[in-house]
Amino acid sequence: MSKTKKLVVMALLTAVELTIWVIEGQIPPPIPVPGVKLGLASVVTLTAMKLLGRKEAGCILLGRIALGCLFAGSLSAAIFSLAGGALSWCVMSALVGLFPEKLLWVVSVFGAIGHNLGQLLAAMAVTGTPGLIWYGPALLTAAIITGTFTGLGAMYLTRALRAYERRQG
């Protein structure tokens, strides 16, 4: 893939991820625990990691976080997004090469756990409230469920995009 084509694909994936993130922000939380979301934008990050590479997926993620906080967020949203996104990216980067594509959902579950842990640690640091750790079990449960869902989405999207690329020659 040429540098120009890769840059265009990264820009498109950033726009898709940002769009998904904005739309998901309009969906009521699945459970009444602060910070729990479906994490649908992670489908794009994990797919990019698999198809383009870790560094490129990190750039897409950072682009989404920066643009999302600029357009729809605040300083606190930036702190939580960066903390969760960075830890999630680190975890998925470490694991993505260790698991076959059919187990991409496992990488996603660990990424979701990392994301929730990063946000929980950021919340504890910002508020100075160590008692927030009691949200841990609910966040862990949510991460397992949502991570499985988004991981399966990333797995099927990766397969579909690879098949499309093969057909295009």
Image: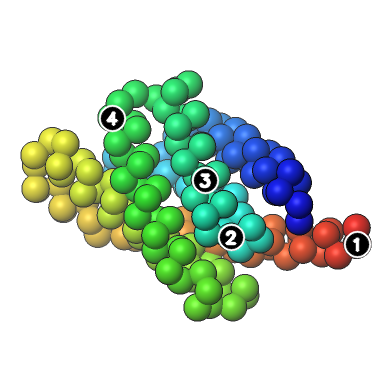
* Badge 4 vs badge 2, beta-carbon distance below 8 Å: no
Q: Nearer the viewer, residue 159 or 29?
A: 159
- The mark found on residue 76 in the picture is 4
Q: What residue do we see at 51% from left, 37% from top? A: 63
- The mark found on residue 59 in the picture is 3
Q: Element under label 3?
A: helix
Q: Earlier in the sequence, mark 4 or mark 3?
A: 3
Quadrant containing the N terminus is bottom right
Q: What residue do we see at 49% from left, 50% from top? A: 58
What's the residue type where badge 2 is placed?
Gly
- The mark found on residue 44 in the picture is none
Q: Element under label 1?
A: loop
What's the residue type where badge 3 is placed?
Cys
Q: Which residue is mark 2?
A: 53
Q: Earlier in the sequence, mark 1 or mark 3?
A: 3
C-alpha gap between disc 4 and disc 2: 29 Å
Q: Is residue 24 visible?
A: no
> Which residue is at the far top?
71
Q: Earlier in the sequence, mark 4 or mark 2?
A: 2
Q: x, y (%) of residue 7?
A: 67, 43
- The mark found on residue 169 in the picture is 1
Q: What residue do we see at 29% from left, 36% from top? A: 79
Q: Nearer the viewer, residue 27 or 123?
A: 123
